[in-house]
């Protein structure tokens, strides 16, 4: 649906002021996916998303949207294609002088659609985002979350097949963020719209994205399914982001206990990572029955990533080395990741 | 004993009529020229939606030149042009030409400022929606800036009222002329007082009207 091929973007003309915002981006967003790009401020996220609808033109490289290279299109064709790409913004960008209704109607008015058709479509969209009673209010009378709902309704007015979200929830509080994310998920699930979103908040990625790419200094340093990146982040920056929502830092008391047991040849401590269904299985009790070893759980937590559970346990295995190794191999065969405790 | 004041009533009425005529016609033309000037200044600038360095620079310089000429000098300097347009350089109608030339660049600048206040995000939004340049101007830029433009026009209008008084120098008539002729040259303080009061009330009315309109339109 959206393909980046070695996209570079350099801002500024003269040498001293040049900023290389994107340094060769390659990514692919598949149809129906919610794809998140996460990075710190200045990493190049906005530049990246703006290269999709050419609010920013890449210095080199290609961006294909639905197979079309928008850069190759003449102005008029480009405007047509842009209508198929909805966009929402961190600051909502609502028209202050217009009512909610008129804001949502704007893309249709630009297309010269007949009045009754516009009215029907706008009311339908307002119902979808839960604002049908606010049609005749002005943006100043709305809360941040409501403003973003208007933004979403407006972005959907032209029945786009792609929705670009530039930090759509960054100006909102946690509760409102969750409700907007739920709405975006409905946009994908019920309308089948592909979503590319950029954010600096890992909880946004955790809650609704299928895929994630981590961008740093204009480079994608890591990408994959959200579950994979969360359970097994490769780069320090990805680890940091994961840590902001999954606190897998061990409490000091547990750390002390582990340190005490370190010299004990009969005691081995591992970190077990359960994804998805594996979380439901009574794995530990099976292991305890199957192998002549004692188990002690030092620390554990289960969170939800993308609607499926993810468990993180610190377990001590008490027994001879060979038996413990055998138990570990069994656990690994059950789709559970086993790691040394650092 | 006493002076005969009966002449004063009709004289004042005439002056008011002349002032209204001069100011409203000049204002109309100045707005028709000034608003497009402001729009062109905004869209042709470096980060505008239709950048054009040549047009921008030329307009910018021309406006600066006209804005720096004092009105009283402008009136005299463009006499040949005025004569070309209205056939004479004297009288109420003739005063309209310099008034327009004086006010239009001013409105251009004020409107430019109002348009620049519009959030860049709104323009990006319009572009992301696939709006044409024309649509961006008519459906996004001007409506979003309208409240601020109305306040700007109010300021320009009041400036115009002031300038129209000076136009008395070319026999333009109007309240300013009345005040100078009777109040200053013939030393009739009552006439001076009446015209000043009338001008103050008029300016106050215009300002209040502008404020009310702008407030109604401006939603933030
Ligand atoms: N129009 C511009 N002109 C010059 N440099 C720019 C421009 N836009 C962005 N940059 C620079 O490009 C780099 C990437 O900016 P970008 O806005 O893409 O980052 P971001 O990841 O969206 O950051 P944030 O989270 O702060 O929005 C930054 O160093 C920024 O200063
Ligand atoms: Mg940004």
Image (tube, grey):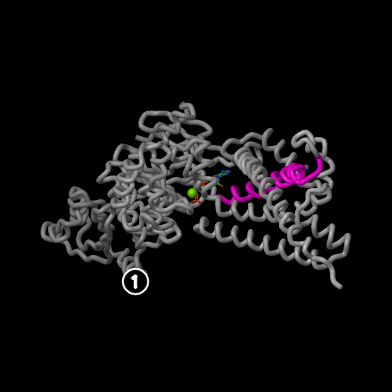
**Start-end of magenta stretch:** B89-118
In the picture, which quadrant includes the N terminus of chain A?
Answer: top left
Looking at the image, residue A213 sits to the left or right of residue B205; the answer is: left
Looking at the image, residue B155 sits to the left or right of residue B64; the answer is: left
Q: Is residue A85 above or below residue A141?
A: above
Magenta stretch encompasses residue B95: yes
Looking at the image, residue A128 sits to the left or right of residue A56; the answer is: left
Q: Write down the chain letter for disc 1.
A: A
Q: Residues within 10 Å of mark 1 (few under 14, many from 20)?
A: few
Give the x, y percent position of residue B66: 77, 43
Quadrant housing residue A272: bottom left
Question: What secondary structure characterizes most of the magenta part?
Answer: helix
Q: Which residue is mark 1?
A: A253
Magenta stretch encompasses residue B111: yes
- Identity of the residue drawn at 78% across and 51% down: B173
SS for callout 1: helix
- Identity of the residue drawn at 58% across and 54% down: B148
């Amino acid at each position: 649906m959206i393909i980046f091929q070695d996209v570079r973007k350099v801002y500024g003309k003269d040498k001293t002021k040049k900023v290389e915002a994107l340094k060769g981006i390659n990514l692919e967003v598949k149809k129906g996916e919610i794809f998140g790009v996460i990075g710190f401020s200045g990493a190049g996220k906005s530049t990246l998303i703006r290269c999709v609808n050419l609010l920013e033109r890449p210095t080199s490289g290609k961006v294909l949207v639905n197979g079309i290279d928008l850069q190759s299109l003449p102005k008029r064709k480009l405007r047509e294609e842009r209508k198929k790409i909805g966009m929402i913004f961190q600051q909502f960008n609502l028209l202050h002088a217009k009512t909610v209704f008129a804001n949502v109607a704007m893309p249709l008015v630009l297309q010269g659609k007949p009045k009754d058709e516009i009215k029907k479509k706008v009311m339908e969209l307002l119902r979808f985002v839960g604002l049908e009673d606010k049609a005749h209010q002005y943006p100043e009378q709305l809360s941040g979350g409501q403003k973003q709902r208007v933004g979403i309704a407006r972005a959907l007015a032209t029945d786009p097949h792609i929705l670009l979200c530039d930090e759509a929830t960054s100006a909102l509080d946690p509760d409102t963020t969750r409700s907007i994310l739920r709405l975006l998920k409905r946009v994908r699930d019920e309308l089948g719209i592909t979503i590319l979103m950029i954010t600096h908040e890992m909880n946004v990625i955790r809650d609704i994205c299928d895929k994630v790419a981590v961008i740093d200094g204009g480079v994608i340093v890591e990408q994959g399914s959200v579950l994979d990146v969360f359970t097994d982040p490769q780069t320090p920056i990805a680890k940091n982001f994961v840590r902001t929502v999954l606190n897998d830092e061990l409490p000091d008391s547990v750390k002390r206990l582990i340190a005490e047991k370190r010299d004990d040849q009969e005691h081995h401590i591992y970190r077990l990572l359960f994804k998805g269904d594996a979380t439901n299985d009574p794995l530990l009790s099976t292991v305890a029955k199957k192998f002549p070893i004692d188990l002690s759980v030092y620390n554990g937590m289960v969170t939800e990533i993308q609607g499926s559970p993810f468990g993180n346990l610190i377990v001590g295995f008490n027994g001879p080395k060979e038996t413990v190794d055998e138990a570990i191999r069994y656990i690994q065969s059950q789709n559970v990741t086993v790691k040394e405790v650092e | 004993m006493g002076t005969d004041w009966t002449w004063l009533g009709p004289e004042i009425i005439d002056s008011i009529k002349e002032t209204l005529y001069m100011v409203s016609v000049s204002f109309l033309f100045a707005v028709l020229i000034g608003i497009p000037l402001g729009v062109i200044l905004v869209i042709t600038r470096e980060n505008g939606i239709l950048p054009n360095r040549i047009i921008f620079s030329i307009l910018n310089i021309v406006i600066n030149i006209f804005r720096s000429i004092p009105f009283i000098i402008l009136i005299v300097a463009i006499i040949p042009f005025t004569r070309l347009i209205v056939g004479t350089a004297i009288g109420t109608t003739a005063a309209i030409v310099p008034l327009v030339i004086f006010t239009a660049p001013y409105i251009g600048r004020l409107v430019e400022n109002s348009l620049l206040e519009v959030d860049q995000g709104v323009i990006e939004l319009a572009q992301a929606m696939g709006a044409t340049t024309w649509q961006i101007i008519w459906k996004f830029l001007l409506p979003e800036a309208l409240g601020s433009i109305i306040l700007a026009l109010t300021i320009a209008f009041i400036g115009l009222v002031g300038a129209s008084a000076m136009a008395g120098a070319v026999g333009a008539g109007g309240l300013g002329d009345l005040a100078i002729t009777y109040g200053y040259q013939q030393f009739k303080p009552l006439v001076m007082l009446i015209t000043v009061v009338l001008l103050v009330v008029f300016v106050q009315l215009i300002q209040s009207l502008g404020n009310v309109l702008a407030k109604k339109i401006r939603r933030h």
